[in-house]
Amino acid sequence: MSKLKHHAKKLIDKVSKGHVKEVAGEVKEVKKKVKKTAKKTVKKAKGLVKKKEKKK
């Protein structure tokens, strides 16, 4: 998460300097990345749950 926070801070700095269009594009990219990682973690979680159920 710290990487994302750092990235967000950079974007905020850019906005305050007036590079709004650039930032809009970058925000979309970040959102895509976040969705991908979120999906991965959900898959991992489901996998762990299945493993635990098998052990019972």
Image (spheres, rainbow, N blue to C red):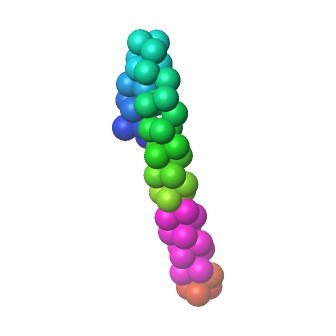
Please name the predominant secondary structure of the magenta segment in the image.
helix
The x, y position of residue 14, in whole percent, is 41, 20
Number of marks in picture: 0
Q: At 47% from the left edge and 19% from the top edge, which residue is drawn?
A: 15
Report the quarter where the N terminus lies. Answer: top left
- Give the residues in magenta: 39-52
**Residue nearer the viewer, 32 or 40:** 32
**Residue 52 is drawn in which quadrant?**
bottom right
The x, y position of residue 18, in whole percent, is 45, 15
Image height of 3 relative to 29, above or below: above
Q: At 41% from the left edge and 17% from the top edge, which residue is drawn?
A: 13
**Residue 50 is drawn in which quadrant?**
bottom right
Q: At 39% from the left edge and 32% from the top edge, which residue is drawn?
A: 7
Q: Is residue 8 visible?
A: no
**Residue nearer the viewer, 45 or 8:** 8
Q: Is residue 51 magenta?
A: yes
Q: Is residue 45 magenta?
A: yes
**Residue 53 is drawn in which quadrant?**
bottom right
Residue extending farthest to the front is 21
Q: Is residue 19 visible?
A: yes
Image height of 28 relative to 16, above or below: below
Report the quarter where the C terminus lies. Answer: bottom right
Image height of 51 relative to 22, above or below: below
Q: At 38% from the left edge and 29% from the top edge, which residue is drawn?
A: 6
The x, y position of residue 21, in whole percent, is 49, 29
